[in-house]
Image (cartoon, rainbow, N blue to C red):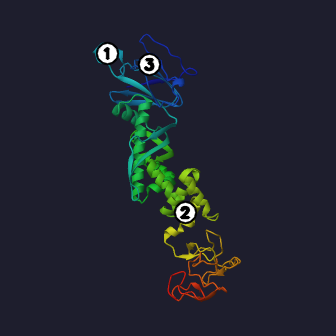
């Protein structure tokens, strides 16, 4: 096939006809936009003129393969009568019509998006099999017109830009899955995905050159990669992250969450729970503060008694979470003794007159000295009146 070319006489040539039915063919700029390919809607005839602009490539395709292409701006015309592409004229003489076609391609880079239709099953040591879906953007252009047309038109039988981009999206998703598989074999976990999105993009980009060269396509940018996790897995990862920041275990975290939920509902049982949370003391507070301080008891730490109020607290606590007393200082002096009361010999708490046990520590109350008490019961130690024959407390015969 022999093509002659003649320079256009100023600007973009207008369409016109000839006695043989030839025309001038050009790709209308208003229809190009983001379309990478346009197929001329009829077969090529003798003396047809092809107009190629700066950002275009015209590819001549016949019998399942590319014969030649023009990538320099000019007007090209078929001038050799003996060329195998003569369209209707050859059919008139021989009854055989050559299937000679022209495809226009864009030279510039185009932007596209990709996304998975089927999930990628990622095996994680903690969460098991996790179904991942990926989305992102890419930038590409035609690098080899011959390979591009032979593959997409000849092999895949596509004729539109949408069909081309659908194929590219499918191949990019495959490369992303391959990259995830490689990085997983190197120890990457589901919880590491968010921190490695840029690294995954670079791995995918490094594989694009060899993978897409067979299609005559160059991918020069992968960006905006998003990996979507199932809701339940994402929630579990978020919970783990919060626990790590707060420095609590799962039981503590759940206790804190329960307090937060109770505080959000000021009525009914939840309201009572919220009141209980407030009663734990300002130093403890609500929510995560409970998980981080008061709920340390769940860790089975050594415990001790508060020197001031007697509450059970962790042995390493410097201040009581109930009363706020400094555990490094001596306990506060007991309250002034009420009239008729006596001090407990064990904890110092004032015991009201007539009480048998200390209201704070439960120790037996000492004998109350009184002018009316002449002796005590040898059995229970209760004071008895002088001359009494039986103990008024236990009934023991004196």
* On screen, residue 42 above or below 321: above
Q: Give the mark count.
A: 3
Taking 374 as reference, is 55 left or right?
left
Q: Are marks 2 and 1 in contact (CB under 8 Å)?
A: no
Disc marking residue 67? none
Q: Nearer the viewer, residue 232 or 374?
A: 374
Disc 2 marks which residue?
291
Picture coordinates of residue 218 (x, y %)? 46, 41
- Residue 29 image offset from top left, x and y in percent: 54, 25
**Mark 2 vs 1, N-terminal side:** 1
Q: Along the polypeptide, which appears first: circle 3 or circle 1?
A: 3
What residue occupies the far top of the structure in this picture?
19
Quarter occupied by the N terminus: top left
The residue located at (53%, 17%) in the rendering is 14
Sequence-first tag of 3 and 2: 3
Spatial CA span between label 2 and label 1: 88 Å
- Between 152 and 23, the one nearer to me in the picture: 152
């Amino acid at each position: 096939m022999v093509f002659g070319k003649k320079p256009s006489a100023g600007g973009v040539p207008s369409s016109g006809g000839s006695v043989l039915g030839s025309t001038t063919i050009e790709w209308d700029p208003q229809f190009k936009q983001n379309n990478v390919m346009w197929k001329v809607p009829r077969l090529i005839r003798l003396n047809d003129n092809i107009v190629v602009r700066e950002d275009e490539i015209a590819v001549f395709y016949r019998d399942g393969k590319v014969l030649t292409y023009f990538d320099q701006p000019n007007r090209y015309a078929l001038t050799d009568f003996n060329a195998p592409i003569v369209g209707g004229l050859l059919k008139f003489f021989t009854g055989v019509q050559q299937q000679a076609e022209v495809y226009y391609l864009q030279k510039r880079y185009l932007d596209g998006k990709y996304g998975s239709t089927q999930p990628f099953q990622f095996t994680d040591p903690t969460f098991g099999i996790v179904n991942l879906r990926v989305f992102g953007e890419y930038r590409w252009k035609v690098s080899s017109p011959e390979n591009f047309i032979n593959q997409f038109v000849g092999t895949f039988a596509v004729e539109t830009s949408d069909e081309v981009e659908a194929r590219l999206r499918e191949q990019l998703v495959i490369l992303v899955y391959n990259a995830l598989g490689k990085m997983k074999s190197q120890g990457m976990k589901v919880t590491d995905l968010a921190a490695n999105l840029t690294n995954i993009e670079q791995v995918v980009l490094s594989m694009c050159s060899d993978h897409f060269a067979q299609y005559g396509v160059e991918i020069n940018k992968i960006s905006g990669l998003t990996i979507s996790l199932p809701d339940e897995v994402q929630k579990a990862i978020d919970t783990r992250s919060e626990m790590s920041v707060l420095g609590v275990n799962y039981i503590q975290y759940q206790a804190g969450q329960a307090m937060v939920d109770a505080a959000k509902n000021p009525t009914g049982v939840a309201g009572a729970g919220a009141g209980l949370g407030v009663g734990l003391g300002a130093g403890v507070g609500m929510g995560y503060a409970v998980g981080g301080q008061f709920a340390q008891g769940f860790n089975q730490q050594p415990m001790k008694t508060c020197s001031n109020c007697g509450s059970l607290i962790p042995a390493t606590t410097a201040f009581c979470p109930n009363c706020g007393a400094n555990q490094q200082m001596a306990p506060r002096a007991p309250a002034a003794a009420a009239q008729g009361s006596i001090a407990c010999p064990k904890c110092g708490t004032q015991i009201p007159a007539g009480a048998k046990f200390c209201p704070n520590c439960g120790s037996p109350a000492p004998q109350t000295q009184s002018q009316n008490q002449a002796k005590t019961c040898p059995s229970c130690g209760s004071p008895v009146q002088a001359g009494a024959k039986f103990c008024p407390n236990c009934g023991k015969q004196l």
